[in-house]
Image: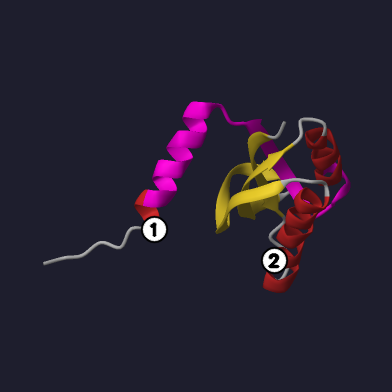
Amino acid sequence: MLNQYETVFIITPVLSDPQMKETVQKFKNLITDNGGEIVHEEEWGLKKLAYPIQKKTTGFYALIEFKAKPEFISKLETEYRRDERIIRFLTVKLNKYAIEYNQKKREKNTVPTTKE
């Protein structure tokens, strides 16, 4: 039984753009290599932090929505802690309402708007 999760992590801002993309790809590969399935992903880019973390005031934000077995989450979070490029992370299990909300939000963003 696969549950649906959403994980947001903040990558240190001292990385170059290719290094940042490689970090995101590492975690996407970790999910798929462990039997998970990526539903949606977003890169929010460089954002100002609400308070300094490790003397940094900005960070690259990335969001991945995925399906995985519950046992995998501890492995994912252990990898976040081991990777010095990750300064913060949060993973939450989505209930049916959150899944529905995310689906509607994605559909709304992909529908082209026409002005007459």
Q: Nearer the viewer, mark 1 or mark 2?
A: 1
**Residue at the image point whose x is 79% and y is 59% from the top:** 26
Identify the residue position indicated by label 2 in the image.
21
Q: Secondary structure at mark 2?
A: helix
Give the side of residue 48 with respect to residue 102, left or right: right
- Tell whether position 98 is magenta: yes
User: What span is colored magenta in the figure?
Assistant: 81-107
Of labels 1 and 2, earlier in sequence is 2
The label number, if any, that marks residue 16 in the structure image:
none
**Residue at the image point whose x is 69% and y is 48% from the top:** 37
**Residue 30 rendering spot, x and y as whole percentages:** 81, 52
> Crowding at label 1, few (<14), some or many (≥20) Cα neighbours within 10 Å?
few
Front position in the image: 63 or 105: 105
Label 1 to label 2, Cα distance in Å?
Answer: 23 Å
Identify the residue position indicated by label 1 in the image.
110
Front position in the image: 34 or 78: 34
Q: Residue furthest right?
A: 82
**Residue 106 rendering spot, x and y as whole percentages:** 43, 49
Identified by mark 1, the residue type is Thr
Identified by mark 2, the residue type is Lys
